[in-house]
Amino acid sequence: MNILVTGGAGYIGTHTCVALLEAGYSVIVADNLSNSNIQALDKIKEIAQKELIFYQVDVTDEKSVDKIFTNHEIDGVIHFAGLKAVGESVEKPLAYYHNNIVSTMILVRACQNYKVKRFVFSSSATVYGDNNVPFKENMSLLPTTNPYGETKAMSERILTDTVKATPGFSVALLRYFNPVGAHESGLIGEAPNGIPNNLMPYVTQVAKGKLEKLKVFGNDYRTIDGTGVRDYIHVLDLAEGHVAALNNLIEGTHIYNLGTGRGTSVLELVKAFEEANGIEVPYEIVERRTGDIASCYADASKAKRELGWTAKRDIIAMCRDAWRFEKNYKEFVETV
Ligand code: NAD
Ligand code: UDP
């Protein structure tokens, strides 16, 4: 089966391409490389020992998308392409609404035109807002505090409505919790531009000495140690979740939490990183970050029940693999 992977050169996309190729799917990547590097595609091929097809295109451009559907018999789409920085989305709402919503609409329309029946969408736990944990798929969504979150909620709605109007169309809305870690080879991983917004890449850069110390955003939440609790999931488990979703896709809209079901506080993650890698991570407690919630973790039982998928890798593996990539990436950048 030919799977079109938009955003396939990015962090989650690269790991999913590897998992798809290893599962026997043929992969066509569409990415404009706005937040990724062309070398990532060679790394996918090197790990999987298989070829893939690459189009450097913007998936908000209908003509370019159309060309891919004309050139190939596409059996399914996994739509990762999108802008994802929460803070930036507050500063540039139009860029976020345009990129993330228009891309979804154009791809869904192409699926209708070319009779493609399978669509897997990258959503986010952010759509739950400040609901009570653990988050369940059937909870009412609460308003998110930023345009990024709204683009995810709106894309979910667009896809759900399209399913109702399109007999035979199957959609999986995958709500990711906090993807971290990297492929065990150290060849692909998360390489954010500039100063990282997210916890794990910040921690790895502190460990490397690139940043002086971690700022822990608040220790007065009602959590185990006062710091924010999140459901960190190894990116390889997440990638396998996409293959499971694709393998089990049936007509209708199906929503799945992809998380471990376990919450880890910021200080617990720092301790796990230190234990896993034998490196100290200096930190200081600072003010809460605007828009943060205290706790966010999944009820991951639906994916287990319906897809036969569970996250297998623990927090130590996440920390070890994230650090291995950070070290390798440095060498990679220096040699390019
Ligand atoms: P990423 O930035 O590493 O990957 C996204 C890829 O999409 C990049 O390679 C980028 O160049 C490409 N892209 C962006 N806009 C495009 C466009 N218009 N046309 C073609 N390519 C385009 O991000 P990621 O962490 O791999 O996230 C993938 C998806 O998962 C995103 O939709 C993101 O919102 C969602 N998500 C991510 C997280 C997370 O914490 N990483 C959590 C929940 C949901
Ligand atoms: N966090 C932190 N310092 C940082 C980055 C994040 O203390 O430099 C905390 C943040 O407040 C939250 C957790 O780490 O409790 C995860 O944050 P991240 O931005 O990685 O994910 P999200 O907030 O999107 O769940």
Image: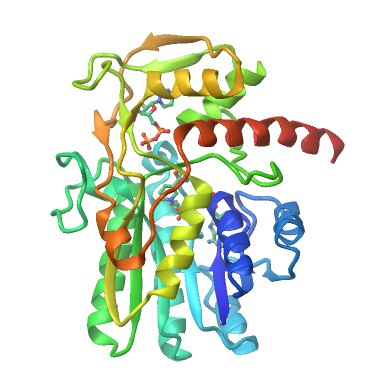
Q: How many marks?
A: 0
Quadrant of the drawing holding the N terminus: bottom right
Residue 210 can be seen, yes or no: no
Q: Which residue corresponds to the image point at 39% horizontal and 59% vertical from the top-left? A: 309
Residue 76 can be seen, yes or no: yes
Residue 198 screen position, x and y as percent: 46, 32
Residue 222 screen position, x and y as percent: 18, 21
Q: Which residue corresponds to the image point at 61% horizontal and 56% vertical from the top-left? A: 14
| Of 67 and 282, the residue lying toward us | 282
- Name which quarter of the figure residue 307 lies in: bottom left
Task: Identify whether 326 is placed above or below 71.
Answer: above
Instruction: Say left or right for 146 vs 190.
Output: left
Residue 151 screen position, x and y as percent: 34, 56
Q: Which residue corresponds to the image point at 22% horizontal and 82% vertical from the top-left? A: 164
Instruction: Say left or right for 312 vs 27.
Output: left
- Name which quarter of the figure residue 44 lies in: bottom right
Quadrant of the drawing holding the C terminus: top right
Task: Identify whether 119 is placed above or below 151.
Answer: below
| Of 245 and 212, the residue lying toward us | 245
Instruction: Say left or right for 300 vs 17.
Output: left
Query: Colour scheme used in the picture?
Result: rainbow
| Of 195 and 120, the residue lying toward us | 120
Farthest right residue in view? 335
Q: Which residue corresponds to the image point at 38% horizontal and 63% vertical from the top-left? A: 101
| Of 326 and 34, the residue lying toward us | 326
- Name which quarter of the figure residue 229 lies in: top left
Residue 265 screen position, x and y as percent: 34, 25
Instruction: Say left or right for 234 vs 86.
Output: right
